[in-house]
Image: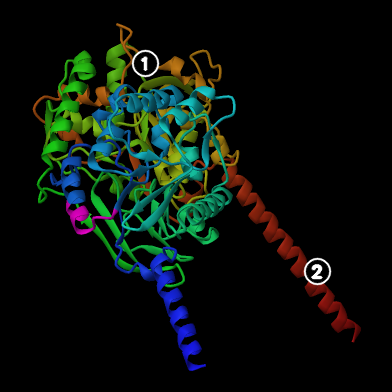
């Protein structure tokens, strides 16, 4: 009996040993495995180091590559991913459709996976299609592209074929050191709003994400008998600790890490919600993000390590990547800048001032000397190119991508600051607005900016003021045209005025009615007063006398170059073209009031009258009761 019991125990022990050797992979017994994700997002073609408003350098892919390699030496099994908007932001973007330099350089740096951001669709469908083909035909090592909820429309077979040929997937699975990573891509609601020319089908983020997570986990279990680390590359963003990616993590089960792009957020600590770590490293390769997780027995994770490694001039550039960038720079000069008789690093002028950063431009409602230069440049350049006067030129905070550095200002610096646009770079358009709609544009600046920072406007050719304490959509209390000689002119509501802006900004003018719930309307028109549809703005691009389209970046470059050795002293301080103040003075609250203020005042009067009537009725009733006693 004892012998049989011993044999039985020996058999059980042997089975346990066998099972321990051939057990399915699980995180509980892979403590030795290093679960690390290296990440970036919103790189925006910033191959070269940038220079901030104080003259300090940041970013640069060659330095980023060095930091990546150092982290891979520490974490050999780490994966390297990116959260989208890898293009649109420097002169290198001009080769997007023809050479796909962004994806090819990311491949050379060792990126495993990336996703699309809204700016990958700025090049119009054909531009994206050509980029995917150019990347594929290069035969270079490329990152996998994943996107689960942004799909070519059913009738767009050309784009679907391009996705298929490149191998764009909902998700991909990577194995490193015995750990499986399931990585999928998501596109946000605001990203979709910011990509009006994408011609893509937007699927519900929460429903699609949960479906994709479930499929990826099942695939890993069925195929590899493993529970994966689920990583979402989301171009949706966070703001103030919440936002679209916060809601995504809260609503979807099974996501371990969200690399959160789009909002250019820098998170010094991850946001944890529903067992999901949301991480962001900031834009333009300012930092390399590193997150390491420690597995629990229940397949959840604890945060083992998290850091943002600053990419600055203390890091030695990687020679291989630096050489590739120099080769790409020569191609840009030859294929693009030569037509403007400019070179990549050509110095246009010297800036003796410390202009504000892009964050400062967004932060408050104010007049910006930096943005005054841009809007003044648009007005000056169009008048120079066409010989016709312009009543007002404008730009928006949302299209200002970088500041102008103190010291030498190069062609590359200007392009990086004004790089957005439809196509490879922004083109200026000239349309007409009625005086009423022109005032509405100023009201957008005054009333919409508090809820949409990107909507702040900066204008040339007008001066105006607004009281932040006034009724919404009636904050502007003074507006005049300011002519080139400094004289002021009343704005006639019925008259047509010539307006110049960038294509990207111009397309947003027609959406003001929708965004303001129909309370404000701005209708771009032709010189005869006929409305212009957003998709037809391409027919109103400004061209010089030789028929060459006028680019935003070139207008600014030409304007600065015309100043000579130094930026004009008139940009040392604001010139009061926009005055922002706050006052509760009755006179300030009703000055030049419009229908919104009168409607609200009428409602207030009615409410007060109703209260008075009800009060009097109650008093009479009480008196009658007392009299009856």
Q: Position of residue 499 (x, y in %)?
A: 41, 23
Q: Earlier in the sequence, mark 2 or mark 1?
A: 1
Q: Position of residue 480 (x, y in %)?
A: 40, 31
State the separation of the CA atoms marked 2 and 1. 67 Å
Whether 24 is drawn above or below 373: the answer is: below
Q: Nearer the viewer, residue 381 or 569?
A: 381
**How many numbered dots are placed on residues in this image?**
2
Query: Residue beneath label 2, please?
Result: 617
Is the residue marked by circle 1 packed among few (<14), some (14-19), or many (20+) residues within 10 Å? Answer: many
Whether 3 is drawn above or below 153: the answer is: below
The disc placed on residue 475 is none
Q: Secondary structure at mark 2?
A: helix
In the rendered image, residue 74 lying in the magenta stretch gets the answer yes
Residue at 61 percent across and 51 percent down: it is: 601
Q: Secondary structure at mark 1?
A: loop
In the rendered image, residue 275 lying in the magenta stretch gets the answer no
- The magenta region covers 70-78
Image-based side of 446 in relation to 559, left or right? right
Q: Quadrant of the C terminus?
A: bottom right
Query: Residue beneath label 1, please?
Result: 542
Q: Quadrant of residue 272?
A: bottom left
For discs 2 and 1, the disc positioned in front in the rendered view: 1
Whether 148 is drawn above or below 372: the answer is: below
Residue at 10 percent across and 51 percent down: it is: 314
């Amino acid at each position: 009996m004892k012998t049989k019991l011993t044999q039985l125990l020996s058999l059980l022990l042997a089975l346990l040993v066998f099972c321990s050797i051939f057990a399915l992979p699980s995180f509980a017994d892979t403590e030795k495995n290093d679960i690390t994700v290296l990440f970036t997002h919103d790189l925006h073609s910033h191959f070269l180091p940038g220079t901030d408003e104080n003259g300090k350098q940041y970013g640069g892919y060659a330095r980023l590559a060095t930091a990546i390699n150092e982290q891979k030496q520490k974490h050999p099994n780490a994966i390297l991913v990116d959260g989208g908007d890898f293009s649109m932001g420097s002169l290198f973007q001009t080769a997007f459709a023809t050479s796909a330099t962004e994806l090819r350089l990311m491949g050379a740096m060792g990126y495993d996976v990336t996703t699309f951001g809204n700016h990958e669709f700025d090049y119009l469908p054909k531009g994206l299609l050509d980029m995917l083909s150019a990347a594929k035909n290069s035969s270079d090592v490329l990152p996998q592209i994943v996107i689960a909820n942004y799909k070519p429309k059913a009738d767009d077979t050309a784009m679907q074929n391009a996705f298929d040929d490149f191998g764009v997937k909902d998700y991909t699975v990577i194995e490193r050191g015995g750990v499986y990573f399931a990585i999928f891509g998501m596109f946000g609601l605001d990203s979709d709003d910011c990509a009006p020319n994408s011609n893509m089908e937007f699927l519900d983020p929460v429903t699609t994400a949960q479906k994709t997570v479930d499929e990826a986990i099942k695939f890993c279990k069925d195929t590899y008998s493993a529970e994966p680390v689920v990583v979402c590359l989301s171009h949706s963003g966070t703001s103030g600790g919440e936002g679209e990616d916060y809601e995504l993590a809260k609503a979807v089960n099974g996501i371990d890490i969200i690399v959160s792009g789009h909002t250019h957020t820098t998170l010094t600590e991850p946001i944890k919600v529903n067992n999901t770590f949301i991480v962001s490293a900031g834009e333009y390769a300012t930092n390399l993000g590193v997150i390491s997780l420690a597995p629990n027995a229940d397949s959840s994770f604890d945060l083992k390590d998290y850091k943002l490694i600053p990419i600055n001039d203390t890091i030695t550039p990687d020679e291989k990547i630096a050489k590739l960038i120099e080769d790409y720079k020569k191609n840009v000069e030859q294929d693009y800048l030569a037509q403007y008789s400019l070179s990549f690093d050509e110095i246009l002028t010297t800036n003796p001032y410390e202009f504000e950063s892009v964050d400062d431009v967004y932060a408050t409602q104010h007049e910006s000397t930096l943005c005054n230069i841009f809007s003044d440049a648009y007005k000056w350049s169009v008048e120079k190119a066409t010989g016709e006067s312009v009543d007002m030129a404008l730009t928006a905070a949302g299209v200002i991508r970088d500041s102008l550095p103190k010291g030498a200002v190069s062609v590359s610096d200007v392009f990086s600051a004004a790089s957005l646009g439809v196509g490879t770079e922004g083109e200026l358009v000239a349309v007409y607005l009625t005086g009423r709609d022109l005032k509405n544009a100023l009201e957008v600046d005054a009333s919409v900016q508090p809820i949409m920072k990107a909507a702040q406007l900066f204008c040339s050719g007008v001066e105006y003021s607004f009281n932040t304490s006034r009724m919404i959509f009636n904050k502007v209390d003074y507006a005049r045209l300011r002519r080139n000689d400094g004289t002021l002119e009343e704005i006639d509501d019925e008259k047509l005025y010539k307006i110049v802006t960038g294509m990207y900004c111009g397309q947003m003018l027609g959406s003001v009615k929708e965004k303001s719930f129909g309370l404000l309307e701005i209708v771009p028109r032709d010189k005869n007063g006929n409305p212009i549809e957003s998709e037809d703005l391409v027919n109103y691009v400004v061209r010089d006398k030789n028929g060459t389209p006028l680019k935003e970046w070139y207008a600014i470059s030409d304007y600065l170059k015309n100043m000579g050795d130094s930026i004009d002293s008139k940009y040392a301080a604001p010139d009061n073209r926009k005055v922002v103040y706050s006052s509760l003075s009755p006179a300030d609250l009703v000055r030049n009031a419009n229908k919104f203020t009168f409607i609200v005042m009428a409602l207030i009067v009615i409410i007060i009258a109703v209260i008075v009537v009800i009060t009097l009725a109650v008093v009479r009733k009480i008196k009658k009761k007392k009299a009856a006693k």
